[in-house]
Image: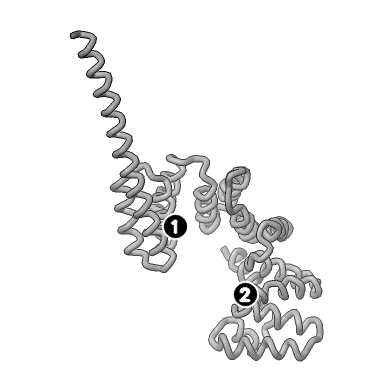
Amino acid sequence: MKRLIVLFFAVLACCGQGVAFAIDQDARARAQAHTELGSAYFSRGQFSVALEELKEALKADSRYAQAYNVLGLVNMELREYAQAEENFRSALGYEESNPEIHNNFGWFLCQRNRVDEAMKHFDTALKNPLYATPAKSHINVGLCSLKKNNLEAAEDAFVRALKLQPQSPQALYYLGEMAYMRKDYLEAKEYCSRLLQVAPSAPDVLWLAVRIERALGNKQAEDRYGTQLRKSFPDSRETLALRNNQYDFSELSKFIGQRNNK
């Protein structure tokens, strides 16, 4: 009888663990579902709904790192910087090696002008062999390098991103702008030609094309891109610069100028 009682409690304990595991899996599944919904609402700019979904995710599973990760992105967009940092740190507390979280936290820190801290997180993300989208971190390294006016490091990062993602609009754009700044107009045109194939209707892209063709003396092409810019984006900063003959204005010069003023 005593042996049977021992066996009974052993089986009961085993079953209890199985029930607990099932409950945990169900909670994690609900947390994941709410987080995915929150992420979708966030991408559409519906921040209040995104926050509600993410709160539900954490109610279901308060240890779900991705919920904290997306919540940090929402807080960042809403300029709730203290909450954003807290949520990114919570996310890393539960998944300390997750490269996506390191990338997002790094970008947050970069935006807060904490560039050296940001670079450490990008480096951690890039050292992870399982990181599925390393081009994103290389782009962020490039943009953060611009904050310190380190053009060489920025260009190296954009080149690395382009090798991984040959049609990256950001990498192509900044490499084209940097070649233009060096007055290497043929290289700039090569990047811009590739860029026009993947992002033909953006004002900064058309403005880059206008300035390159002007520098090369291709009046017909310059006029064609200028006309397209004025018609498609009449109220853009680039069109204003074109009307005022401010050919030194660009997204890159503005980016660096803003950093110099901080």
The amino acid type, in three-letter code, at marker 2 is: Ala
Q: Are marks 2 and 1 in contact (CB under 8 Å)?
A: no
Q: Residue at x 70, y 71 (%)?
A: 177
Image vertical order of residue 20 relative to residue 259, above or below: above
Tell me, for residue 89, which label it has, or none.
none
Q: Earlier in the sequence, mark 2 or mark 1?
A: 1
Coordinates of residue 147 in the picture (x, y in percent): 62, 60
Q: Which residue is mark 2?
A: 199
Q: Nearer the viewer, residue 81 or 228?
A: 228
Q: Which residue is mark 1?
A: 73
Q: Residue at x 60, y 86 (%)?
A: 239
In the rendered picture of this protein, how many numbered marks are placed on residues?
A: 2
In the figure, is residue 38 to the left or right of 15?
Answer: right
Coordinates of residue 203 in the picture (x, y in percent): 60, 80
Image vertical order of residue 13 relative to residue 187, above or below: above
Q: Secondary structure at mark 1?
A: helix
